[in-house]
Amino acid sequence: MKFKEYKGLDLAATADEVLKQWDAHDTFRKSITTREGHPSFVFYEGPPSANGLPGIHHVMARTIKDVICRYRTQCGFLVHRKAGWDTHGLPVELGVEKKLGITKE
């Protein structure tokens, strides 16, 4: 299969086209199911913005994390993705601290 050559740089249209192809071929699900029984690669990560407004640095960090997971998948590892596992309790924790008057100081 030859890769499609793009004459113009319309990243939004290209992303839509690729996503449609992935959906049509169920690519992401197959990337998991075809690797059942293979060694797992676990990459723990938090949400893009645990306690502040999102910024471009969050997008950059998430992109790097995604590239690592994709690379390890291509190396044959089973890579389940579950973002934000480590700070799901943070909003509750911050609320309790506020109610009890606990500060960083």
Image: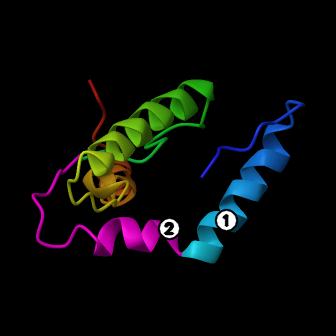
Q: Nearer the viewer, residue 1 or 100?
A: 1
Residue at x-position 42% and y-position 48%:
47
* Quadrant in the picture for residue 83: bottom left
Residue at x-position 71% and y-position 66%:
20
Element class at badge 2 = helix
User: In the figure, is residue 17 to the left or right of 93?
Assistant: right
- Residue under circle 1? 21
User: In the figure, is residue 95 to the left or right of 4?
Assistant: left
Question: What secondary structure characterizes most of the magenta part?
Answer: loop
- Picture layout, residue 100 above or below residue 57: below
Q: Is residue 80 magenta?
A: no
- Residue under circle 2? 27
Residue at x-position 28% and y-position 62%:
80
Residue 64, position as x, y percentages in the image? 43, 31
Residue 66, position as x, y percentages in the image? 43, 42
- Picture layout, residue 11 above or below residue 97: above
Disc 2 to disc 1, C-alpha distance: 8 Å
Q: Nearer the viewer, residue 57 or 89?
A: 57
First to last magenta residue range: 26-43
Element class at badge 1 = helix
Q: Nearer the viewer, residue 67 or 17?
A: 17
On residue 95, the disc is: none
Instruction: State which tag comes first along the sequence, 2 or 1.
Output: 1
Q: Nearer the viewer, residue 96 or 80?
A: 80
Q: Residue farthest to the right?
A: 8
Contact between labelled residues 1 and 2, with CB atoms less than 8 Å apart: yes
Please tell me how crowded label 1 is: few (under 14), some (14-19), or many (20+) other residues with Cα within 10 Å. Answer: few
Residue 28, position as x, y percentages in the image? 46, 66
User: In the figure, is residue 77 to the left or right of 89?
Assistant: left
